[in-house]
Image (cartoon, grey):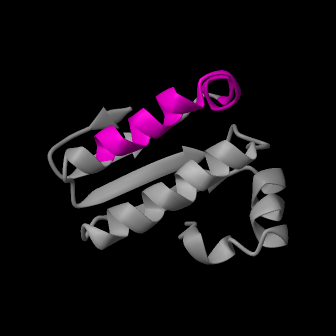
Amino acid sequence: MSDNSETVEITPDLTILFNDYYAFRTMLMDAIAKKPKYIILNLGDIPVMNSISISSLVWFLKNARSEGISCTISAIHPDLLNTFEVLNLKEYIDHQ
């Protein structure tokens, strides 16, 4: 995770998502706690997410936006994008 006062960038590791979802959720919560203007999430190397990770991601996006933080997904793996479409969660991703 890299950051400056205005932007925080998160690039989670696939291993964390499946072996330590708590670390992923903590990573997301820490980003919100820094109160940046922008959070950029890179999911380009994440082809799949389990239900716990997806729910953490949706929670994160809702909470960050309610804090006035603009969230963008800078890259998303095509397979993960398909999963979001199937689950009707595409509204939560602001993909560039």
Seen at 79% across and 68% down, the residue is 87
- Residue 18 position by quadrant: top right
Left or right of residue 7, residue 42 in this image: right
Report x, y in % for residue 32.
29, 50
- Residue 65 position by quadrant: bottom left
Report x, y in % for residue 38.
30, 59
The C terminus sits in image quarter: bottom right
Please state the total of marks drawn on the protein image: 0
The N terminus sits in image quarter: top left
Does 64 appear above or below 8?
A: below
Left or right of residue 45, residue 11 in this image: left
Report x, y in % for residue 2.
33, 33
Whether residue 22 is in magenta: the answer is yes
Q: Residue furthest left?
A: 5
Whether residue 23 is in magenta: the answer is yes
Does 2 appear above or below 54?
A: above
Residue 30 or 46: which is nearer the viewer? 30
Seen at 51% across and 30% down, the residue is 22
- Report the predominant secondary structure element of the magenta stretch: helix
Seen at 55% across and 53% down, the residue is 57
Left or right of residue 29, residue 13 in this image: right
Report x, y in % for residue 86.
85, 69
Q: Give the range drawn in magenta.
A: 14-31
